[in-house]
Amino acid sequence: MAKEKIVILGGGVAAMTSAVYLTENENWQEKYDITVYQLGWRLGGKGASGRNPYLGQRIEEHGLHVWFGAYVNSFRAIETVYNQLNRPDNMPLSSWQEAFKPHSFVVLQEFIENEWQTWPVDFPTIDGNPADGTLDLHFWQLLEVLIAWLHKFIETLEDEIEQANKATKLQTKKSRDRSLLQHLATEITDAFDDIEDEVSDFFNSAHNELKEIWSSPKILATQLKHLLSLRSNDKNLQNPKDRLVVWYIVRKLKRWLNSEAIELLDENPTIRRAYICADLAIAMTTGLIKDKVFSKGFGSINNIDFKDWLKKNGANEKYSVESAPVIGFYDLVFGYVDGDFSKGDVEAGVASLAMLRLMLCYHGGVMWKMQAGMGDVIFSPIYELLKHRGVKFEFFHQVEALKPATNSQTDNLISEIVMTEQVSLKSNSYDPLVNVKGLPCWPSYPLFEQIEDAQANLLQDNNINLESFWSDWPEVYEAKFGHTLPTKTLKQGQDFDKVIFGISVASIAHLCPELIALDDKFKQQATQVKAVATQAFQLWMNKTDEQLGFNYIPESQERPILSSFSQPFDTWAAMSNLLDKEDWPLNNHPKNLAYFCSAYTCDDYPDKDVYDFPAQQKAIVKQNALEKLNREMQPLWPEAYHGDEFNWDVLYSANNLQGESRFDEQYWRVNVDPSERYVLSVTNSSQYRLATDGTIFNNLYITGDWIKTGVNAGCVEAAVMAGMQTSRVICGLPEKISGEDGFEPDGAI
């Protein structure tokens, strides 16, 4: 039987995940012949990183990359890669446990009365391997998280409000509300033996029609937590009284908060922060029940922005809707249309499900930090494993077009793939990795010594970026050599049978115009699922976080990951953990490393022959970064300033540059290329996401965080799930993908 030839276009997370699972069976080569075609010199897509040989083999990223402890599928995939690769124990990052370390310390910034206030959050560590977790949670299990969250903060609020001599006793008067408390009492007393006297008195008063019912916020929140624990275990959605009890109690707690807490919020950060968290939990609980998400699914609330949904369900607009946790979530997903920070837009279903999963499903730390660049930790091991398994890689191949079959008698098929061969190599293959202190890494530049000399010299003389959509390399090449770059056309039935399209959604319009002209749903996917440009810069520094004046370090000594700060560059991560994986001179090396990133404002992308567009945008990013340091970092780094002037000496300079010019040795970038933009989840867009085999073309499989996955948001987990789905449709593996039905209802009435 002839092997099926599979072509994979692109080397991002989804594409590489599909390749890993397509090659899981030992006899896969009896069935498939797999070739990956990659633009430029490295794998990674938006997650590509490089090593700069001219500056300490430093790590240069597209932005900040951290994994969440709830990335169940991602950890399963990377655990598979490291276990199968079986690196020697004496090699750096020989196992996934060495490549990732749990991280619990997150910092939010609040802007209160024209001043920034720091809100440090040290999440609890939860034992276990993220790969052993699950995203397949029932409605009651998700609600249990919200109520546990609510319970935690209600306890804090009752204590604080009592100290402020405000009311903490609650009375229930209406007969309907009494009947709901009777239901609660019956459920709890039937299930638990050790009921405290105070709670027993409360339950007795609910059953005795002659007694007044008095309780406290703590009592109500605790008993509600017990009820949700019962329903979480039995997953019984049939009795509407359970939902009515939840509805009644959270609304009663909301009225109490509005009555007793509001006037204390501006002066007391403990009360304000507990109020914000409790209020958000109440609004989300109210919305999930009122909108019948249990019977309609999370997808049913994707027709409204998350902030608007919170407002609709009673969240305090001033304190909660525009709070640091909510803003931080929008920052996390770059949730700003065209990078306009006044146009936040994230689907409510996507946002609420993601937040609940991140809080409930994590193991180890709520986040996990990679211990080198993402290219080093993720894409080098994947490349090495796939290469060992027999997957072929063709670097320096730029996809120009996918063409459909023109014979109307045939099925809808991809008939041709047109590519440009960007360079001529000295040998038949390209060896892409470099060794940095024993670790295989991707370089920040092509390895020119493997490219034919005349082309290599021309590339370097003209500072050509072979990864750029706006590259003038074809013109430079033709002017020098008198002919165009060679092209390659792959033909269906000869060079390929199946195509995995792993290039991001913003590229579809450029690479697949003939396809979307024939497939309306594919066209809607290309136009309705949006992407946003991003910006980032990295600073190598001479001072530690404490020496810069940031003094909110927990006992664990973890470095902060901070968000909801001033825009742009609303996110800062202290990344000194990476310095030992770089290769600086022993007598002249940086002490600290800071990463910044955010969305980038751009709503107009020119034609690909406007070659100076990337440089123009990168210059704006540099100016944004300088503005950040000159004017906005003092609240976080007070010791980095002389008066109100930023002290440029805190920046490390290998060449001892002076003043602001020290910034020129730092790293900054703008991600405007179609394949680099971050995929958004704007209101009403999930409905346009297709499954991996959802186009009309029978031999085309789309994959990426932009397809329908059960996450439907731009992130590694969605990309991994997409790659898994692609592989499963083709070969049946993996059989199980955790969380892919997350937007489906649980079947209640």
Image: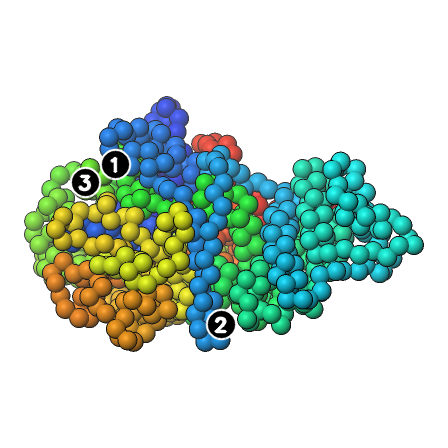
Q: Residue at x 57, y 54 (%)?
A: 352
Secondary structure under the numbered disc 3 in the rendered image: loop
- Residue at left 73%, top 56%? 216
Q: Please name the residue shown 33% across and 55% down the image.
A: 574
User: Quadrant of the rendered structure where residue 99 is?
Assistant: top left
Residue 150 visible at all: no
Q: Which is closer to the viewer, label 2 or label 3?
A: 2
Sequence-earlier tag: 1 or 2: 1
For the residues marked 2 and 3, what is the alpha-carbon distance in whole angstroms?
Answer: 46 Å
- Determine the residue positioned at 44% across, 48% down: 104
Disc 1 is placed on an element classified as loop
Q: Position of residue 78 (x, y in %)?
A: 38, 37
* Disc on the earlier residue, 2 or 3: 2
Q: Position of residue 579 (x, y in %)?
A: 24, 49
Image quadrant of residue 21? Answer: top left
Q: What residue is disc 1 on?
A: 92
Front-lying residue, 171 or 317? 171
The three-letter amino acid code for the residue at tag 1 is: Pro
Taking the image as shown, residue 668 lies to the left or right of residue 653, namely right
Disc 2 target residue = 112
Residue 525: assigned label: none
In the image shown, does 319 or 650 lie closer to the viewer? 650
Q: Residues within 10 Å of mark 1 (few under 14, many from 20)?
A: some
The reply, left or right, for residue 193 in relation to residue 364 is: right
- Mark 3, residue position: 437
* SS under mark 2: strand
Q: Quadrant of the N terminus?
A: top left
